[in-house]
Image (cartoon, helix red, strand yellow):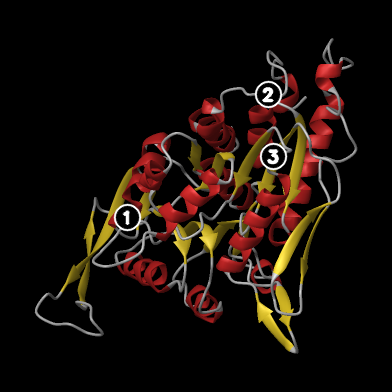
Amino acid sequence: MSQANTKDLTTLPVGRLGLIPLISCKDLGEKVNDWLIQWRKERSHDELGSFAFEGYQRDSYLLPVQTARFGSGEAKCTILESVRGDDIYIMVDVCNYSITYNIGPFTNLMSPDDHFQDLKRVIGAVSGKARRINVIMPYLYESRQNIRNGRESLDCATALQELVSMGVENIITFDAHDARVQNATPMHGFETIQPSYQFIKALLNHEDGLHIDNDHFMIISPDEGSMNRAIYLANILGVDMGMYYKRLDYSKRVNGRHPIAAYEFLGPNLKGKDMILIDDMISSGDTVLKISSLLKERGAGRIYICSTFGLFTDGLEKFDKAHKDGVFDKLLTTNLIYQSPELLAKDYYITCDMSKYIALIIDTLNHDQSISQLLNPVDRINRCVTNYMSRYTK
């Protein structure tokens, strides 16, 4: 029986569970729903038949919603089922660029701003009726605009304050660009979750012959911003880590910025070692591919690029060429945001499914239990590596 089923039910549910994945998060939401259905149907408890567990075991936890648009492009949200007293979890992918809507005779692609507005529409439709409103936003809206340099807006902080002012109690996100943004809403729940275990699990399930030890393996950070991720994973695996930093030429300005004079490496000898190059997101991909090529010049073995969010804003052609040229071996990203069919068809791509993890978090929070153990994947990673290595030592 799964971990979720064997968990002791020491608390009552906060309310009847309701899951609202917006159209941007439809596929991931359906997978999460399938896990919840399976676990709760298999679960047994003396009190399951009592009124406190009304609606606990159902054929689906998805709540039907409609976000209709007027000809002007404006929209509204309608909840098609009662949510009174429910514990609601709203899922949204603000990076899903595959969805369109019409303004008169024109067709628009939905931007992150449009997705965020739809999220607020759903919140507005359930406010005052639901017992608790929780938002699961894997890619935190405006998370890259988290600090102020000069006369700039603080969009991420503003967005978070807007959500809590509408009644949201908990915000769940993954690998926030800077977790300190939670200081904008100190009196409400905010969790930023790392997919470290899912990266290791997916990699070991797809690759053979890896030796996860200090003599054969390393973790690399492509810049100083990802150092904490690299240090955390390196400490769990018991291997060395290294990082690159950009040395800037402060005597010049190009397009308002100091140009990069060189990429400098800090770390031990990496010749012959396999390695994970880890970052929170791949936007254009220029940085990770440049670092991968520099690692190969230093004699690196197999290189696995791991990134929580694969945006690929410049397309996949440069990754195709880099893989063909041997710059990297595999590319791993999660399904927390939209994955194009073109990406999923690549032979060098490995997807990391996060639906079971999200379902565990929702199931635990619905019982108002601590998720600390779920947020700390050390034991799971060590168990996964031990089982993997045992296959090659027998």
Name the spot of residue 393 as percent of width and height, x first.
54, 34
Query: Which of the labelled discs sits on residue 188, or is there none?
Result: none
Q: Which residue is mark 1?
A: 225
Q: Farthest residue toward the top? A: 46
Q: Earlier in the sequence, mark 2 or mark 3?
A: 3
Q: Which residue is mark 2?
A: 367
The residue lying at 49 percent from left, 56 percent from top is 306
**Numbered-mark total:** 3
Q: Farthest residue toward the left? A: 251
Which mark lies nearer to you, 3 or 1? 3
Q: CA distance from mark 3 to mark 1?
A: 40 Å
The residue carrying pointer 1 sits among few (fewer than 14), some (14 to 19) or many (20 or more) residues within 10 Å by Cα, namely some
Residue type marked 2: His
Q: Earlier in the sequence, mark 3 or mark 1?
A: 3
Name the spot of residue 281 as percent of width and height, x first.
47, 61
**In terms of secondary structure, where does tag 2 sit?**
loop
The residue lying at 51 percent from left, 73 percent from top is 323
Name the spot of residue 154 as percent of width and height, x first.
37, 59
Q: Earlier in the sequence, mark 1 or mark 2?
A: 1
Q: CA distance from mark 1 to mark 2?
A: 35 Å
- Circles 2, 3 touching at the beta carbon (< 8 Å): no
Residue 332's place in the image compared with 165, above or below, is below
**In terms of secondary structure, where does tag 1 sit?**
helix
Describe residue 235's horizontal placement relative to residue 128 as left or right.
left
Quadrant in which residue 89 is drawn: top right
The residue carrying pointer 3 sits among few (fewer than 14), some (14 to 19) or many (20 or more) residues within 10 Å by Cα, namely some
Q: Which residue is mark 3?
A: 128
Residue type marked 3: Gly
Describe residue 313's horizontal placement relative to residue 248 as left or right.
right
Residue type marked 1: Gly
